[in-house]
């Protein structure tokens, strides 16, 4: 029914002039595209009003909204980051809010005659709250300059001359919710406000929404939050063309790509006999929190993304800030739920919740929903920091049933985007060649060990007690080795040391490991390779998190295990 939310191609943006200014457009022109017209038609059908009533209560506020937001995006690097994204998001969320509102009889618990008398007010308030919830962004997140140099603010009224905009550096990402209170009167007429003020319950909830205080906004706030999540999820997961038109440096885009790769090609979902990496239900994808954090972090590092949090609590915050996960009632990333397969296996996990649309654009591509039950636990959720080391212990299995946890197989060497790594001039090629030559003879293993070792550049070192033949996933098109046999780690840990060297060489060659920079972990000095420790070893562990389990067996830190395997030891 909501196929209109799927865009076949990006909407044409207003062509800016050579100096970057955009011509303002009328509401009629802005709303004239076929997709936006379909959204307006959908809104009218769900409002269930006559044309004249619809024009007064919905069409005119939407026209005023369009003239105010013009071609501004809804975010810089997140959802609806394309020109006109704010208008698209506004129309989508109104349509979703009206759809969700239809499943409620409001006000809850009131007599039927009272619900009937207030029905239109609740419906309109849901639409207004949804439309205005992000409007504060144009007041505090962007700086709009008019031709002639004057700064425009939304309380000045619609933009009436050529304009250009930029995002405010160091902006407060929580401020826009409250800033909507500065602007809502530009959208809602005094007649509409007079009408709504006659219904005390809906009026108070709408006021809380306009002030950004959703914790006090009751069922109306819940409708708006759900509608926003639906619009964002659709944009992130169901519209590859639009995602490609967003800025290339979008962290959200890289996170979404990593999640798709892991879920589609690496993780095991809905295992009937017990523990999985995640479970797909009818309305959500649930992933075990620590494994997804560890492996997504490793994926990002292999792609050369810098600044990835090394611990899970800030990593979860990053996922939450980028909107790729859905938060719980306390606005936290971590959910706690009990999984029951109905045949004697039951366990509790800390989980992340994702929209399935983020992973599978086409619903028909999704796996069958989990046949067991997933029950979210009520009460206080697990703190994000507590989930750092929280992994549920599955029921014991026979040794023959044990399999190693899947590890994301690194793809073909990543080519980092220019924003991610410093640009290297052609004169730096000799630097890299010299360093690679230096590394060529480091920690060279014996011929016998060479024949047994498996390169850690292609697969993470195996667990000591969970060894099974596996295959790597060929996602990137380049041929990848198929691992026929994985040998348990010997007591001298030679393979970890050699794997570290191979990883180091590959990272330097592909520029995913920076050298000779102020923040670099590798430097060349007078024909000698210098490594910054323990940073370089910690970076290796982040890309291969299963080393942590081997380190626990030997009762050392993971980075120390790598360091000692390579031949270095701590000195007093």
Image (spheres, rainbow, N blue to C red):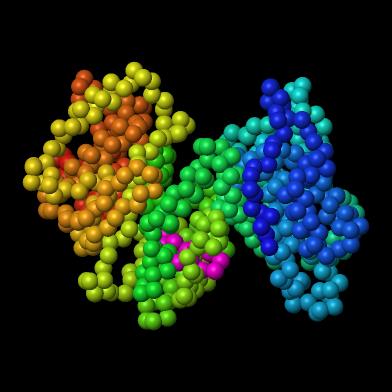
Q: Is residue 525 left or right of residue 305?
A: left
Front residue of 215/500: it is 500
Taking depth in this image into account, of 308 and 20 the one nearest to the observer is: 20
Question: Which picture quadrant has residue 564?
Answer: top left
Residue at 33% x, 21% y: name it. Answer: 428
Q: Does residue 65 appear to the left or right of 460 in the view shown?
A: right
In this rendering, would 194 be left or right of 396? right
**Residue 60 visible within the image:** yes
Answer above or below: position of 54 versus 106: above
- Res. 387 visible in picture: no
Q: Give coordinates of residue 204: x percent, y percent.
A: 77, 61
Residue plotted at (14% across, 37% down): 443
Report the span colored magenta: 279-289
Quarter of the image with the C terminus in it:
top left
Relative vertical location of residue 163 with respect to residue 391 in this rendering, above or below: above
In magenta segment, residue 549: no
Q: Position of residue 70 (x, y in %)?
A: 75, 39
User: Residue 136 versus residue 46: which sits nearer the camera?
Assistant: 46
Instruction: Report which quarter residue 120 is drawn in.
Output: bottom right
Q: Is residue 280 magenta?
A: yes
Q: Residue furthest bottom?
A: 343
Where residue 411 sits, quadrant-wise, is: top left
Q: Position of residue 444 (x, y in %)?
A: 13, 38
Q: Looking at the picture, does residue 290 appear above or below residue 399? A: above
State the image coordinates of residue 83 (x, y, percent, origin top left): 67, 38
């Amino acid at each position: 029914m909501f196929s209109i939310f799927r865009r076949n191609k990006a909407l044409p943006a207003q062509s800016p002039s050579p100096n970057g200014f955009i011509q303002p457009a009328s509401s009629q022109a802005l709303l004239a595209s076929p997709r936006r017209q379909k959204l307006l038609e959908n809104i009218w059908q769900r409002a269930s009003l006559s044309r004249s009533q619809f024009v007064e209560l919905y069409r005119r506020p939407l026209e005023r909204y369009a003239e105010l937001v013009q071609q501004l995006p809804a975010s810089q690097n997140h959802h609806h980051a394309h020109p006109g994204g704010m208008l698209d998001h506004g129309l989508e969320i109104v349509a979703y809010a009206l759809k969700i509102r239809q499943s409620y009889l409001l006000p809850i618990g009131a007599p039927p005659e009272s619900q009937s008398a207030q029905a239109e007010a609740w419906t309109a308030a849901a639409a207004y709250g949804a439309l205005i919830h992000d409007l504060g962004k144009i007041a505090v997140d962007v700086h709009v300059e008019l031709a002639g140099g004057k700064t425009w603010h939304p309380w000045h009224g619609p933009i009436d001359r050529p304009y250009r905009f930029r995002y405010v550096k160091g902006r407060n990402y929580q401020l826009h919710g409250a800033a909507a209170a500065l602007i809502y009167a530009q959208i809602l007429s005094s007649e509409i406000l007079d009408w709504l003020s006659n219904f005390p319950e809906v009026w108070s909830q709408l006021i809380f929404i306009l002030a950004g205080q959703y914790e006090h906004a009751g069922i109306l706030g819940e409708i708006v939050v759900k509608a926003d999540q639906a619009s964002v999820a659709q944009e992130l997961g169901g519209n590859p063309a639009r995602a490609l038109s967003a800025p290339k440096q979008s962290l959200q885009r890289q996170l979404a790509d990593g999640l798709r790769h892991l879920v589609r090609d690496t993780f095991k979902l809905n295992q009937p006999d017990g523990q999985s990496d995640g479970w797909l239900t009818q309305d959500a994808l649930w992933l075990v929190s620590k494994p997804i954090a560890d492996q997504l972090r490793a994926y990002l590092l292999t792609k050369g993304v810098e600044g990835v949090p090394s611990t899970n609590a800030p990593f979860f915050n990053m996922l939450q800030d980028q909107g790729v996960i859905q938060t719980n009632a306390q606005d936290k990333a971590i959910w706690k739920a009990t999984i029951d397969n109905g045949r004697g296996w039951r366990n509790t996990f800390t989980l992340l919740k994702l929209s399935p649309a983020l992973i599978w654009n086409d619903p028909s591509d999704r796996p069958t929903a989990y046949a067991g039950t997933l029950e979210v636990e009520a009460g206080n959720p697990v703190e994000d920091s507590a989930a750092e080391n929280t992994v549920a212990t599955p029921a014991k299995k026979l040794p023959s049933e044990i399999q190693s946890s899947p590890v994301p197989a690194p793809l073909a060497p990543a080519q980092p985007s220019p924003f991610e790594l410093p640009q290297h001039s052609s004169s730096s090629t000799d630097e890299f060649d010299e360093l690679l030559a230096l590394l060529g003879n480091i920690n060279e293993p014996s011929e016998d060990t060479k024949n047994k070792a498996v390169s850690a550049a292609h697969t993470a070192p195996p667990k000591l007690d969970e060894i099974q033949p596996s295959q790597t996933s060929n996602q990137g098109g380049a041929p990848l080795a198929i691992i026929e046999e994985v040998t348990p780690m010997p007591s001298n840990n030679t393979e970890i040391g050699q794997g570290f060297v191979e990883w180091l060489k590959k990272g330097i060659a592909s520029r995913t490991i920076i050298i000779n920079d102020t923040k670099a972990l590798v430097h060349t000095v007078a024909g000698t390779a210098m490594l910054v420790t323990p940073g370089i070893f910690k970076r290796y562990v982040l890309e291969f998190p299963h080393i942590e389990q081997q380190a626990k067996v030997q009762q050392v830190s993971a980075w120390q295990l790598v360091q000692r395997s390579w031949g270095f030891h701590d000195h007093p």
